[in-house]
Amino acid sequence: MKEIKKVAFLTAGGLAPCLSSSIGFLIDEYTKKAPHVEMIGYINGYMGLLKGESIPVTDEVRKNALVLTKHGGSPIGNSRVKLTNVKDCVKRGLVKEGEDPLKVAADQLVKDGVDVIHTIGGDDTNTTAADLAKYLAENNYPLIVVGLPKTIDNDVYPIKQSLGAWTAAEEGAKFFLNVVKENSANPRALTIHEVMGRNCGWLTYKTAQYYRKMLSSLESKGMFLDAFNQTRGRQDVHAVYIPECKINFKAEAARLAKVMEKYDAVNVFVSEGAGVADIIRDMRRRGEEVPVDAFGHPRLDKVNVGQYVGKRLGELLKAEKVQVFKSGYFARSAAPNTKDLRLIEKCARKAVACALEGISGVVGPDENDQAKIQACAFERVKGGKPFNVRKGSFRKLVEDIGQPKLRKKRTHG
C-alpha cells in the first residue's frame, strides 16, 4: 500500500450539526495516530477543489482541533457542486467550456499530492467522491476516499443513524417551543411547523417526539395553568404530515375543526417534502416553473410545502391567522448535542483507522450489520431511504395526538 503522506478534508451539501465536529475529531485522531501526515481542508467543498483553494492544518490547529467540536456549521465551508454535472460547473465558472470537472478535480488532487480525502456530506457528496476515486483509479492514481454520512434527514442507505440528525430534531423542538406561543397573538390560529426532510419523515417524527417530551417535562413540573388558558393542549402537536403518507385534507380538517373549537388553535408539523409531488403537479398545471438544484432535486424552498398545507387547511378550518415557521436553518446549523458527539467521535476515529488501512467507503452504523460502525462500500450508499411508518413509536405518536392511522403512499417502479 502507498504510504499516506497527505490528507484532505471536504464538506459539502447542506449544513448539519456534525461538520465542524467531524473535522475536529479527524484532525485530533490523525495527530495522535499519524502525526507525520500533512492535512489540508478544501474551501467551500467541491468548489474549492475545482478552484484549487485550500487551507492548511497548522500546528496551532492540531493543538486546538477539539475546539471545532463545539461549533455548528463548517469552518471550511460548503457548496452544492456535482462534478458530473458539466453544464452547471461551466455555468458557474468553475471549469472552462470543454473541460471535464472530474478531470479538473482529479488533477488538483494529484497536484496537491493528496493520498486520502475525507468527504463529509450526504449521499450526493459521497457518491461524487466515489466517482472521483474511480476516475483516478482508471488513470493509475490511487486515492483513498473515506466519507462520513451527514444528513439531518437520516435517509441514507445503509446508514442506521446519520451524523447530526438527533441534534437537528432536538433543536427543531426547541425552536417550536418558542414560536408556538405565536398562536396566542390571534384567535383561530393555524400554526405550521415546516421541518426539513425531502423524501423522509424521520426528522419531522423525531422533532415532534422530542417536542412532546419537552411538554411532558413542563407538565410534570406544574408549568401549565389550565384554569387560566395556559394549557398543554394549546401548545401540543395536533397533526404530523410526512412524505411517506398521504394527506387527506378534508378528513383532517373535520378532525382538526374540533381541536380549533377547543383550543382556539391548531399546530401542525409537516415535512418539507410532504405531498410535494402533488404540489409540483399543481404548479406545472398552472404553467409555473419548478426550479431544481445541481443534483436535479426540486428546490423545496420554491415549492413551499408549509405554505401550501397552511393555505389548504386554513381555508377549510376558517383560520383567522395562518403562520408558517421553518426550523430547518436554526436546527441544521447547531453544534451537536452530547448523543451526536459520541457518535461523531466514534465514526471519525474509525474513519482515520480505515484510511490508514487503505479502506475506502462511508463510515457509519451499518443497518445491515447490527449497526456496527464500519466502512460501507460506496456501491451500497444511496439517498432517499424512506421512514418506516410502521415503527411502533411513530404509531404511538400519531395515536397520542388523536390522528388516524396514516395511509402509506403507493410506490411505483
Image (cartoon, helix red, strand yellow):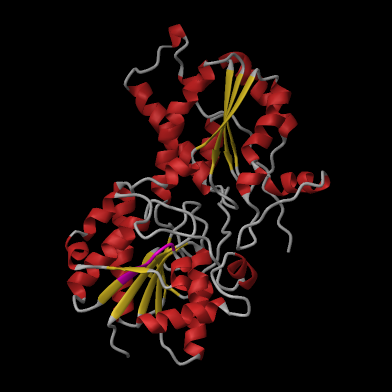
Residue 124: % across, % down: 53, 65
**Residue 301 placement: quadrant:** top right
- Residue 162 picture location, percent across and down: 43, 57
Q: Which quadrant of the figure has residue 69?
A: bottom left
Q: Is residue 7 left or right of residue 377?
A: left
The percent position of residue 247, horizontal first and vertical second, equals 69, 39
Quadrant containing the N terminus is bottom left
Q: Image point 44% across, 47% down: which residue? A: 332
Q: Is residue 274 visible?
A: no
Look at the picture and state if 97 lies above or below 308.
below
280 versus 234 height, above or below: below
The answer to whether residue 130 is seen in the rendering is yes
- Going 69% across and 28% down the picture, which residue do you hit? 313
Quadrant for the C terminus, please: bottom right
Residue 76 vs residue 298, the one in the foreground: 76
- Per the rendered image, the range of residues in magenta is 40-44
Residue visible at 57% across and 28% down in the picture: 238
Residue 140 sits inside the magenta stretch: no
> Residue visible at 52% across and 31% down?
400
The answer to whether 93 is drawn above or below residue 67 in the figure is below
Would you say the magenta stretch is mainly helix, strand or loop? Answer: strand
Question: Is 58 positioned to the left or the right of 239 in the image?
Answer: left
Residue 314 locus on image (x, y percent) = 68, 25
Which is nearer the eye, 231 or 2?
A: 2
Is 64 left, or right, of 364 in this rendering?
Answer: left
Count of numbered tags: 0
The part of the image, by quadrant, that contains residue 367 is bottom left
Q: Residue furthest top?
A: 227
